[in-house]
Amino acid sequence: MQQGRRRRSAFHVAGGAGLLGAAGMALVMAATTPAVKQQSVRAAAEDDRPAKNVIFIHGDGLSIAAREATRLNTVGYHDDLVMNSLAVSALVHTSADDPREAVTDSAAGATAYASGIKTYNGAIGVDVNRRPVPTVLERAREAGKATGLVTTAQVTDASPAAFGAHVENRSQQSEIARQYLDSSKPDVILGGGEDYWYPPGDPGAYPDNPPTDPTEQSRSDRGNLVQRAQDMGYDYVTNFTEMRRSDSRKLLGLFANQEMFEQRAEGQGDIYDPVVSLPQMTRKALDVLSRDRDGFFLVVEEEAIDEMAHRNNAELTIRATQQLDRAVNAALRFAAAHPNTLIIVAADHETGGLAIENTTDTTVPTGITGSAEDGPFDIAGSDLQFTIDWTTTNHTGGDTPLTAGGPGSAALSGVIENTDVHDAMVDAMRLDE
């Protein structure tokens, strides 16, 4: 069924240089040359140095098709996204170990990445028997490394939580925040979700019941966790200026009541305009964590890809993926100066059943329902356009794309399990030694 076909302008800077930067453009140009790419893969396989730093970049819900739609709309046929410039690539099996559902959720998916085990949907850092399992972030901290969590979701949402907490149900967000402070102790925590850090009646920096979503209000059942964080030495910041000015080695930034965007269908109150962008948070986290002489482990997540795909909102799904790519560019710029850095760009599952179609593909067979079409979208640098067809508002079970570069990245090639990503990060940092 065809819905709301409206022309979309490409969201990019002419030629791509503004999006990618000179370093990123050079990497992309090299990566799209097959011989150079093969040399890069061989070099990765021969690089047996330990990774001092690991940056795990997570596009929640980012399918192969969503990644390609973003490439087409951003840089077109003859260029590429920064995330595709990394030398090593893989397809990742995403299944959970759930007794009722065939397709994973973000909690089980992130726990597989964080702890190397398959578990049930909704589980955060626990196995199928609800027993806590150590995370790569916790193990990196035990090895003396700095650690950080950056997301446009609530900082206590499923994906970041799986790296720093252990609860039986992902809904326990204030308990997750408490565990960050009392147990896993990330040095940097940046994102949304202020509501879970303040008790009812204490709105914090972002007012309760805002007009964009009147349901948002403070709801911590673990007391004032912001005050506790400050008592523990965290510098608490609530906007870009405060974040930029902070020189603390322990940083807590909460920039929204809930997610740092409003996930809605197009034209129904949908907003993607974070107070602090994902690339800005990423650069700040890298600045803080890189002061640790033993290195660091950092998780960076763009949540809006998933949330907008749940609403079949193609325009903001693409925009969020563009922001993820800019965060990857920030990581690559850091790695250029710190070559002992492993960068991984991955996704926990697909969302929305997104497909790229010709604008002329408008016929729906008789009896077929549930297909929503969005667009058209420009293909950058050409006169062509494409549409996006959605088949569901839920998660789908296909393999997800992964790209990686740096020490240890050679282990992440081919067709792999999501748990293999955890193992590769542990091996790269020599955490088993």
Image (spheres, rainbow, N blue to C red):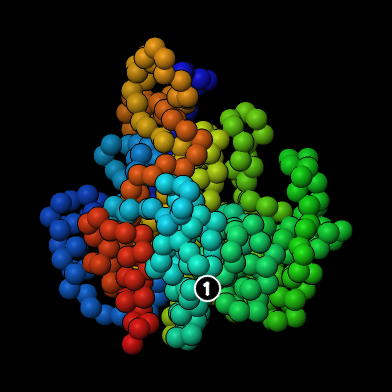
Q: How many residues crowd around disc 1 within 10 Å: few (fewer than 14), some, or many (20 or more)?
A: some
Q: Quadrant of the C terminus?
A: bottom left
Furthest-left residue in view? 35
Q: Residue at x 44, y 33 (%)?
A: 10
Residue 220: x and y in percent read 76, 63
Residue 22 visible at all: no
Q: Residue at x 45, y 67 (%)?
A: 114
Quarter holding residue 156 = bottom right
Q: Residue at x 33, y 23 (%)?
A: 358
Where does label 1 land, which residue? 132
Residue 107 visible at all: yes
Q: Is residue 397 above or below residue 423?
A: above
Residue 73: x and y in percent read 39, 35
Furthest-right residue in view? 201
Residue 370: x and y in percent read 47, 24
Could you tell whether 194 is left or right of 54 in the image? right
Residue 266: x and y in percent read 58, 30
Amino acid identity at mark 1: Pro
Q: Residue at x 47, y 33 (%)?
A: 392
Could you tell whether 280 is left or right of 257 in the image? left
User: Circle 1 sits in a helix, a strand or a loop, which is it?
Assistant: loop
